Image: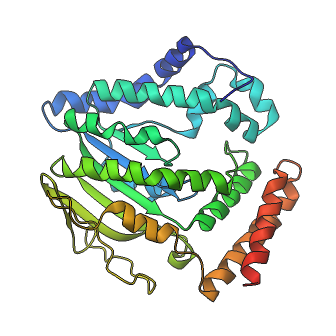
Amino acid sequence: MTTLYSFTDSDVDDAIAQLDDWLFHNAREAAKSESGSSPEMLIVAGAQGAGKTYLLEKQLLPSGRYPNHVRLYLPDFRKLHPQYEAMSEHGVLHEYEHTETFIRALSGKIFELAFANRYSIIMESALDDKAFAGFPPGAVAAGYRFEIHMIACKEEFSHWATLDRGVKSVEKGEIERFVALSQIQASQANARNILNAFEHACTQALGSEITLYERGFETDQQSKVLCHSTCDAIGVLTPQADYNGQAFFQAPYHDTPVEIRRSPEGSGSGTYLQFFQVVHAGMIDEPVRQLMVKACCKTLGRSTDLVPRIPKDTFRELSQYVLKYTYP
């Protein structure tokens, strides 16, 4: 990705130095006191607009189970770009676009340092880079245990969610971007390789677990658990009866039980199949279609006061959804 604002490897190192104590302190202390224990990798995955950050910050982190984990990305990390002050004069969308190359370099460096020291790691994956399928084997070899949370959303719901998030971010002055439906579809196309790699890694690390969620208008826009499986023997993923005592979400359009099951022979119901069935189900029921129309109208109403800071495509895409879901 090209950018108007250059940076060097030294700039990335300087950013790491600024984050060092806050980012790595707890992990270092835990590594000293828990010598020989297996590090953990918490992965929250799903296409853009799936609600990964919300799930992480509102449900997972408040549980208190991850105080020593190194988080690879936060929006504020973008402000460590050496030319951030210059680009900030042009608005939050400009900031996002022109810090993207920098943030990938910075997050990559954070990962390298955390992985080399066997620190526990928090990673969010939008499935937008095929490279995510490449690191799990190395993490297994390094002794990592996995906790994977995957959120499946219907494609057009995800797209609306990114548009709504973008409008809110411009309104609040937060760093964000607008995502095209084609980008979300490209991410979904990567899902097979990435999710299969995550699943296989779970089967190779005892104590690993994998949880699949659905998010959409059917779930009141909340991420609700569809199924949860654990690895209690190498090569095996065993479905559990609930998720930490929480019953699974069951929608009438799920014709068969949703479960992730693997055996050493490779048989069973895999993660990608369950994910795929949600993503491509479509918003068919009339109440759901009405909710989509109301949501798009609300986003349109909020965005009109933000012209010209909102891309023109946003208005067009939201309007097209209103027409599509009003008239079957």
Q: Looking at the image, which is closer to me, 168 or 253?
A: 253
Please tell me how many numbered marks the rendered image carries. Answer: 0
Q: Looking at the image, which is closer to me, 189 or 52?
A: 189
Is 169 situated left or right of 45 in this image? right
Q: Is residue 288 visible?
A: yes
The quarter of the image holding the C terminus is: bottom right
Q: Image quadrant of residue 274? A: bottom left
Is 306 situated left or right of 237 in this image? right
What scheme was used to colour the molecule? rainbow
Outermost residue to the top: 10
**Residue 77 place in picture, x, y as percent:** 56, 32
Q: Is residue 97 above or below residue 154?
A: above
**Residue 228 place in picture, x, y as percent:** 28, 66
The quarter of the image holding the N terminus is: top right
Q: Is residue 61 visible?
A: no
Q: Is residue 320 above or below residue 266?
A: below
**Residue 248 place in picture, x, y as percent:** 34, 76
**Residue 135 place in picture, x, y as percent:** 34, 36
**Which residue: 26% across, 42% down?**
40
Q: Is residue 223 above or below residue 293?
A: above
**Which residue: 71% across, 21% down?**
5
Is 174 situated left or right of 138 in this image? right
**Which residue: 33% across, 74% down?**
258
